[in-house]
Amino acid sequence: MKKFSIVIAGGGSTFTPGIILMLLENLERFPIRKIKLYDNDENRQMIIGEGCKILIKDKNPEIEFEYTTNPEVAFSDVDFVMAHIRVGKYPMRELDEKIPLKHGVVGQETCGPGGIAYGMRSIGPIIEMIDYMEKYSPKAWFLNYSNPAAIVAEATRRLKPNSNVLNICDMPIGTETRMAKILGLSSRKELVVRYYGLNHFGWWTDVRNKDGEDLMPKLKEYISQFGYLPPEVVDKQHMDPSWIETHKKARDIVKLDPNTLPNTYLKYYLFPDYVVEHSNKNYTRANEVIDGREKHVFGECKRIAMEKTSKNTTLHVDVHASYIVDLARAIAFNTKERMLLIVENNGIINNFDSTAMVEVPCLLGSNGPEPLKIGNIPQFQKGLMEQQVSVEKLTVEAWIEKSYLKLWQALTLSKTVPSATVAKKILDDLIEVNKEFWPNLK
Ligand code: NAD
Ligand code: G6P
Ligand code: MN
């Protein structure tokens, strides 16, 4: 069987060791000959790189490994680019969250003004990496899970329409894992779902088991009481207090539409006042991650490198991250696995903008995704999605045209922002701190 060469872009990410451990656990399904890490922050990546070097050496010494900040070294001789960069890193995430909050608006990594700010930073570097891939490994595929995925996906649609790029999010995967647990099933893979929306902005309309039994009634009953909090712990990634609160809040979102089950991120759009009231302006999710995941992962990588062994490590396999293997395998081996991907609408949702990037079930094979038809969606979802997709499109247009006006319009249109006045204040503050990353707006 062919063995693949991959580069993980954003090598210094807190998720890199978990993904490497996951890849090492899945070698039978997806054989690997070479793993490279690529980052533009040499010092940050070195810590993760030195830790991962030992993880790989301990488990599969025959796999070649290197980490680099040189694009030519990183992107040459690869079959897949797995991209999870965070442009501006946690200090900028902290500002994305805290600046809107200062103005009484939701402060979130991917939703509202914070997501728009992060999008404006991410577009350039993502497009640049796709260019590197096409220059050095023209047949490779770019699997993107860098955020904000909705805006990044729209940017790749506009600027790289013919490239081998797939945008995917793990939130539905995480939530389906919770659904499976609630139903007493062993894996989300026992579920067959229908889902539609934008990234971090969608709804399940149908959840069945393989025999076709409708599981929605049981799920709705449970979730309207407890949200997406199953009786037992399911995942290590989304267990901090703020995430538990988010899973719980789904019980209020379902009240707005008894026919569907919501993506957890809808809470930021449907209950922004509640979210702001329950946010700590001085300690946001960025701080929780810096004090939690980042400390743990970097601490462990340093220890492993020093002790030259990964024995007894508390770094864990991101089990649910195995969707990344499913994704690569589907392309490599034409598996036609059914997965939720972010693709151009083109009539999938009949009564919705055909150029919108929507998140829907697709059959994935060697020549890319074949989306399944959704048909018409109800007025409530359609109205919300039209507003939000306009925010995303205006942000990408603002970046391309360097337009202050379009970005102000994007912020004004976000359901999280109460007025054009507040939008402008937030925008001017964001411009101030994003000088190094955003185009110069006219
Ligand atoms: P992190 O800050 O720990 O890691 C990101 C890395 O990207 C950093 O080492 C940084 O130096 C690097 N980077 C930034 N700009 C770069 C550039 N231009 N070129 C190369 N490298 C660059 O962040 P994290 O919390 O581990 O998250 C990483 C990314 O993955 C984020 O975008 C996050 O939102 C995303 N994420 C996505 C999903 C999903 O389902 N789509 C799930 C989890 C995380
Ligand atoms: C989910 C989302 C990702 C997001 C992550 C945030 O997995 O799908 O898009 O990046 O949560 O997690 P964090 O722990 O960094 O807040
Ligand atoms: Mn996501």
Image (spheres, grey):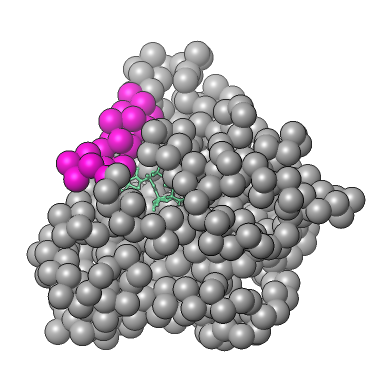
Q: Residue visible at 33% across and 52% down?
A: 274
Q: Please state which of residues 80 and 300 is positioned toward the viewer in this rendering.
A: 300
Q: Residue visible at 47% across and 18% down?
A: 313
Instruction: Give percent across and percent down for residue 157.
Output: 48, 78
**Residue 390: in magenta span:** no
Asked which quadrant contains residue 119, the reply is bottom left
Instruction: Give percent across and percent down for residue 410.
Output: 30, 77
Instruction: Give percent across and percent down for residue 66.
Output: 44, 40
Left of 123 or right of it: where is 366? right
Q: Quadrant of the C terminus?
A: bottom left
Image mark count: 0
Residue 430 seen by the camera: yes
Q: Please state which of residues 66 and 293 is positioned toward the viewer in this rendering.
A: 293
Asked which quadrant contains residue 336, the reply is bottom right
Asked which quadrant contains residue 342, the reply is bottom right
Q: Furthest residue to the right?
A: 211
Instruction: Give percent across and percent down for residue 367.
Output: 70, 71
Q: Which residues are magenta?
A: 279-299
**Residue 295: in magenta span:** yes
Q: Residue visible at 65% across and 84% down?
A: 350
Please name the predominant secondary structure of the magenta segment in the image: helix
Q: Residue visible at 70% across and 40% down?
A: 180
User: Vertical placement of 58 versus 405: above or below?
Assistant: above
User: Vertical placement of 192 versus 369: above or below?
Assistant: above
User: Vertical placement of 304 versus 15: above or below?
Assistant: above
Residue 162 seen by the camera: no
